[in-house]
Image (cartoon, coloured by chain):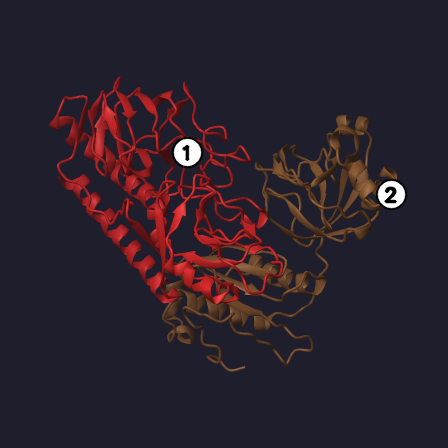
Amino acid sequence: MSMTILRPGLLTSIQDLGRVGFQKYGVIVSGAMDCYALRVANILVGNGEGEAALELTLAGPTLKVEQDLLIAITGGDLAPTIDKLPIPLWKPVYVRKGSVLQFGPCRSGCRAYLAVAGGLCVEEVMGSASTYLRAGIGGYHGRALEADDVLRFRAPSEQALQLIEQLVKSSDERFSTTTWSVTTEFAIPDEKINTIRVTLGSHYEQFAEESRNAFFDQVFKVTPQSDRMGYKLSGDPLTRTDAFEMISEAVTLGTIQVPSNGQPIILLADRQTTGGYPRIGQVVTVDLSLLAQMKPGEQIQFKEVSMQKAEALYLSRENDLQELRAGVTLKMTTE
Amino acid sequence: MKNGIFVPKFGMKKSGEKMSLMEEKEHVDFTIHPLGDRAIMVTFGTSIDVTIHRKVKTFANYLETHPIEGMIEYVPAFTSVTVYYDPFSVLQLKKQPSLEKTETAYEIMYSKIKQVVLGLENSMEDTKKEVDIPVCYGGEFGPDLEFVAKNNNLTTDEVIHIHSGGDYLVYMIGFAPGFPYLGGMSEQIAAPRRADPRMKIAKGSVGIAGKQTGVYTIGSPGGWQIIGRTPLELFRPSENPPSLLQSGDVIRFKPISLKEFTAYKGDSQ
């Protein structure tokens, strides 16, 4: 069960839901930028939701399929093809030995996830397969994928095997897919202004009144200095009334901090565990997917929601995912 | 204190509520804030000092030995401890009689944490670990040692003597894996950050930035004045814990020669 990388793409790395439990030792969480897309990809191939998958960025890789495999691609549309024929996103696809899986130009979003039934066979470091690029640990020898790397996969789950049985019967083409697909809440950023919901940060009140208003009223642009660590935004600078030095404390996924130049930074998957800049806001968990799919140049406007609302949105999204999982399992095992 | 006095507010615009336990001889002042929709931060003060550090450490030790249900992990810092939680698991606790009036996972965590912190006794058990960090000062490993000396009208030997002469308290681990934020450096050897940060600083580099000293645990860019290098691995990804040092440890720097550096294989203890 394997695939060989022919061309690695811009930044292709192995990620799961992150390395948790070691932040007190300064070990960053890492993990997929768009955890929602990763979880759905895994569900579609009968894996546990947190299995390791490939995260592809803007320009995807080219891979040689060395064995018949059940795959699913979710997230941004990086124009996937099998032997030059387009294949669908958000569906299980059974691909045949010898075919070439190639990604084209990015049509929408920024990051796609490629999950394979059974999951990637990689050694976990501190309980996670996620690649921690700066420390050179996890994933594929602690680095992004390169040409000639060989990815191995474990045996598919029982329900994946049942689906494969259906798909083998249905076609003898290079690939085959299901008649059903999942309807998701997946939001793709567009050229207009993308609304990102936030709760107020602990230091919101320390900002000057016009900056507090400007935080919500103005439109910020995602700058090219944005990566897995965080998105640097540009807009009218935000200033604090009382600019005393901060003492470093924990920061988290979606924390919006404002360094002395007044330009906000949204911390993402590869953020440091602690930070010393004032926190003006915090992106709600359910909007992190949309953010992860945004590209430099795209525009953001923040909208305030209460903590209660943020938590309710989170719980509702989790319920939807469990329903989606139940629905897919039913399709896999009964059709 | 009765239950239910401190009702958490959502969308709080103020800087949280201040609480204190008057019954105790030593006040335990603290504030509780949300950090997003899946984490909560308890802050014990606003300055970097040993008294506040002890409170942080006492609470962190409690969490280590008595994890709150639904807690994923916790992160101690200079003055605060942040608890990350899974809202789904936390909401299971609503079945408990004392929590049936709560509505959200945040309220439950708030109530649980408040209860724990109010019950904490500031008994500082001496669990600290003492660690010697061998350092080869100057030369190729410490390109900025001369600068630090000149900046303070000292000789390089005096800088080494002062840097290796004191005890340093590990206030917290952060910035990079296993990276200790240290307290206790003499202001006699303070030095500003480099105006032009280096693109790559080697793992093990020992540096000074302002009144702080620290050790780079992985190779990274950085603006600290580099005065030496340790052969000791502070970040050990295949071990548990993966960090040699932990919050609350006490360290000392021990000068070694280049020869000793090259021959170094051992551990600190």
Residue type of the residue flagged with mark 1 = Ile
Left or right: residue A193 versus residue A166 is: right
Q: Is residue B46 above or below residue B225?
A: below
Left or right: residue A97 versus residue B60 is: left
Residue type of the residue flagged with mark 2 = Leu
Residue labelled with disc 1:
A14
- Image quadrant holding the C terminus of chain B, namely top right
- Give me the residue at 29% from left, 45% from top: A189
- Give me the residue at 37% from left, 74% from top: B100
Q: What's the CA distance linking mark 2 and mark 1? A: 50 Å
* Letter of the chain shown red in the rendering: A
Q: Is residue A245 above or below residue A37?
A: below
Mark 1 chain: A
Residue B3 in picture, x, y percent from top left: 48, 79
Instruction: Kindly state the secondary structure of the residue where label 1 is placed.
Output: strand
Same chain for mark 2 and mark 1? The answer is no
Residue toward you, B241 or A162: B241
**Is any atom of residue B37 visible in this view?**
no
Tell me, for residue B178, which label it has, or none: none
* Letter of the chain shown brown in the rendering: B
Residue A262 in picture, x, y percent from top left: 51, 53
Instruction: Kindly state the secondary structure of the residue where label 2 is placed.
Output: loop
Query: Which one is closest to the eye, mark 2 or mark 1?
Result: 2
Residue B43 in picture, x, y percent from top left: 58, 65
Residue labelled with disc 2:
B154
Residue B246 in picture, x, y percent from top left: 65, 50
- Image quadrant holding the N terminus of chain B, namely bottom right
Mark 2 chain: B
